[in-house]
Image: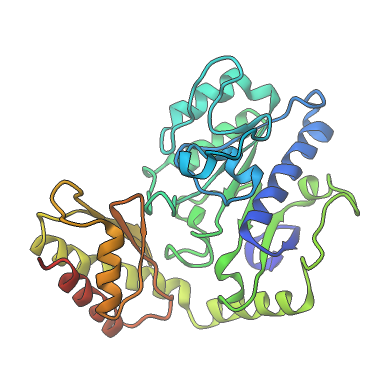
Amino acid sequence: MTRVFGYDMVLPMNTGAEAVETAIKLSRKWAYQVKKVPKGEALVFGASGNFHGRTMGAISLSTEAEARDGFEPFLSGVGSVCNYNSDYSIEYGNVESLRKALEAHGPKTAAFIVEPVQGEAGVVVPPRGYLKACRDLCSQHNVLFIADEIQSGLGRTGKLLACDHEGVKPDVVLLGKALSGGVYPVSAVLANKDVMLCIKPGEHGSTFGGNPVACVAGIAAIRVLLEEGLVEKSFTMGEYFRDKLRKVQAKHQKYVKEIRGLGLMNAVVLDESALPMSAFDVCVRLKENGVLAKPTRQNIIRLTPPLCITEEEVDICVEALGKSLAF
């Protein structure tokens, strides 16, 4: 696994949220040991609209009321709002907002964690060059650049990692979800020794993290991904899928505002003002027409099929969407 992704070490965990919590702890430890941030003052920043999980560190990074309300207080120094001197949000896709945050707080900042493509927010693809610019800013301010590739990684966007679209190598990469092929809980934190070895044996771990079954499943899934050319297939089928979806959009312009995505990570954005039902209701109709899809943000339908999907199966999905939007 380390050879495939180009890192010295991997720390296996069980879930994506565990990987995020591990990254927060790891970056703080690095900040105190390597960057020499004063004890107790390390900051970990995220970007607005993110979803990194439902554990305390993950929701501390969040800006969404649905994730945060009723779970206060959050982790100190962890978040997407720079409220240490002023209330200032780091906007996803806006390089200047990150620049402003790091210029103000860079000496105490341990890490910036970001989704290369925001999944729960509705498959939000940042402007071209955003990831590269964030990587450069983090390097300039000696801040760890952490890519949460739990949804976007492992071929989902038509590249092995979504960061590969811009040729960006993060300091830390988080993987999960598809890492076992969907059959067993497993996640991974990838980093080089200068970062990973800041945590000593006994300082972090999990009862079932790195268990033999999980590791075998993860290795097998990566082997299939590479040997069967699923990364390249994701790119090709994603182009085909979006082309077909845009034809549905053209037919239902009144209801469909936008088709967006990368590879086989795509979204249909609906016009709430025109549609007589919510995205959830459309997904119920999709189910009745033979397709399972997930709504998000009230008006967005996420379409993330298996990477082995065929053109015929894409056509079935698109036909079902057209039927579900017929009023």
Task: Pick out the residue farthest to the front.
Answer: 70
Query: Residue 118, relative to residue 9: is it above or below?
Result: above
Q: Is residue 147 left or right of residue 91?
A: right
Mark yes or no: residue 268 visible: no
Q: What colouring style does the render use?
A: rainbow
Which quadrant of the rendered structure holds the C terminus? bottom left
Query: Residue 295, relative to residue 50: is it above or below?
Result: below
Query: Residue 88, relative to residue 45: is it above or below?
Result: above
Q: Position of residue 45 (x, y in %)?
A: 59, 34
Q: Which one is in front, 119 or 68?
A: 68
The residue sitting at 16% across, 71% down in the picture is 322
Q: Position of residue 145 (x, y in %)?
A: 61, 41
Q: Which one is in front, 174 or 232?
A: 174
The residue sitting at 43% across, 72% down in the picture is 232
Q: Position of residue 159 (x, y in %)?
A: 47, 63
Which quadrant of the rendered structure holds the N terminus? bottom right
Res. 215 image quadrant: bottom right
Q: Position of residue 281 (x, y in %)?
A: 27, 63
Q: Is residue 4 left or right of residue 286?
A: right
